[in-house]
Amino acid sequence: MKCIAWVVALGLLSGCSLSYSEIGIPVPETEGLEIGRSTKADVLEALGPPRLVSRQFDGDLYTWRRTKDRERSLVVLPVFVKAFSFTDGESRRDELSLLFDREGVLRGIGRRLETEEGGG
Amino acid sequence: MIRIALLLIAALSAGCAEAIFSLDSHRTHDAYTEASLEEFIKLRDAGPVNKAEVLATLGPPIQVIGQDTGEVFVYRRLARDTRTINLNPSMVNYFVGPTPPIPLYFDRQTSGRDDTLMVFFDSQGKVQGEGFNLGIGETGQSGAALIGEGVWGLLR
């Protein structure tokens, strides 16, 4: 009886899988940066290079981003017939965007932290 | 000839879900919350809003679109749910020996929904207008969406 229970339990558990991926470094802190005063050079020196730069009519937008993806799946295999398969995935991001005017002066800060760890 | 036909059928059926019942569910990041959206609308109602205020309120956009008259900030989150029922003789190969994976019954429902907010700026960086839709909460569209939302609710 115990043996059967083990076989059933192993059969049920054999289809589990988990995968995680993380792209990018933790989003930097903006301490020391001042809106209306800090320049692109100050920002680059303090935070390092951004992941994205987008040109705007009124300046530029620099974005630092970290993406975390998670996927887990479960396949239930009762007596060698795959009866049920479940997969769920989630993608989350930490992001920081800095807005500069045409003179290269910091004009705005946007930040969103969605992963458990948040920014670094 | 029959062998070639069987191989062809097997190849064509290879993409079918292997399980009798399968559910695939995926969600992307939050993009914006109801609270931040409400705050943005309040700000917008109070008077002209600039790009810096939008960034501070809604956070970084997922996409920036350049237009002739200014930029568009796009905030979006996605939900995709697929429910598949697949009855296939090859599933019982263990009991009856090798059989071609010809689907006896195959039914797949996919539901892709999104919540999207677009904020339009003029060339001076002032908000010209915005548009949004909240589609993820509408689970009445299909069985896949209902099951997917139910499962996500349980997981949370």
Image (cartoon, grey):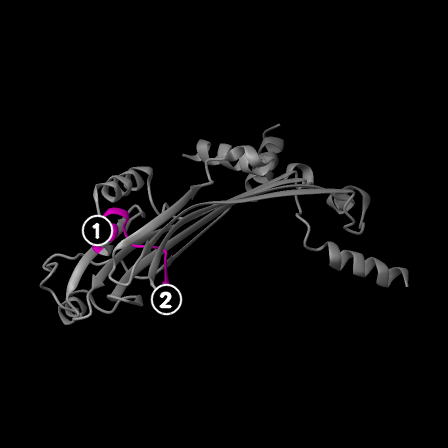
Pick the front one: A5 or B56: B56
Q: Point out residue B18 in the picture as x, y percentages from the top left corner.
A: 67, 47
- Residue B41 % position (x, y): 28, 41
**Residue that protrudes farthest toward the top in the picture:** A1
> Which element carries disc 2, helix, strand or loop?
loop
Say whether disc 1 or disc 2 marks the residue closer to the N-terminus. 1
| Amino acid on which the number 1 mark rests in the picture | Glu
Query: A15 left or right of B122?
Result: right
In the image, residue B123 sits, relative to residue B106, either above or below, namely below
10 Å crowding of disc 2: few (<14), some (14-19), many (20+): few
The residue that mark 1 highlights is B53
Which subunit holds the residue at mark 2?
A: B
- Residue B138 image offset from top left, x and y in percent: 49, 35
- The image quadrant that residue A106 belongs to is bottom left
How far apart in space, not on screen, are marks 1 and 2 (Cα)? 22 Å
Residue assigned mark 2: B68
Using the image, determine if residue B151 lies above or below residue B108: above
Left/right placement of residue A87 relative to residue A25 reads right
Using the image as rendered, state which of residue B45 and residue B24 is in the foreground: B45
Does the magenta portion include B66? Answer: yes
Residue type, mark 2 in image? Asp
State which chain disc 1 sits on: B
Q: Position of residue B150 (x, y in %)?
A: 50, 32
Say which residue appears at 40% left-offset and 34% top-offset.
B156
Question: What segment is highlighted magenta in the picture?
Answer: B52-68
Which is closer to the viewer, label 1 or label 2? 2
Number of residues whose C-alpha sits closer than 10 Å to that of mark 1, classed few (under 14), some (14–19) or many (20 or more): many
Nearer to me, A83 or A9: A83
Q: Quadrant of the N terminus of chain B?
A: bottom right
| Labels 1 and 2 positioned on one and the same chain | yes
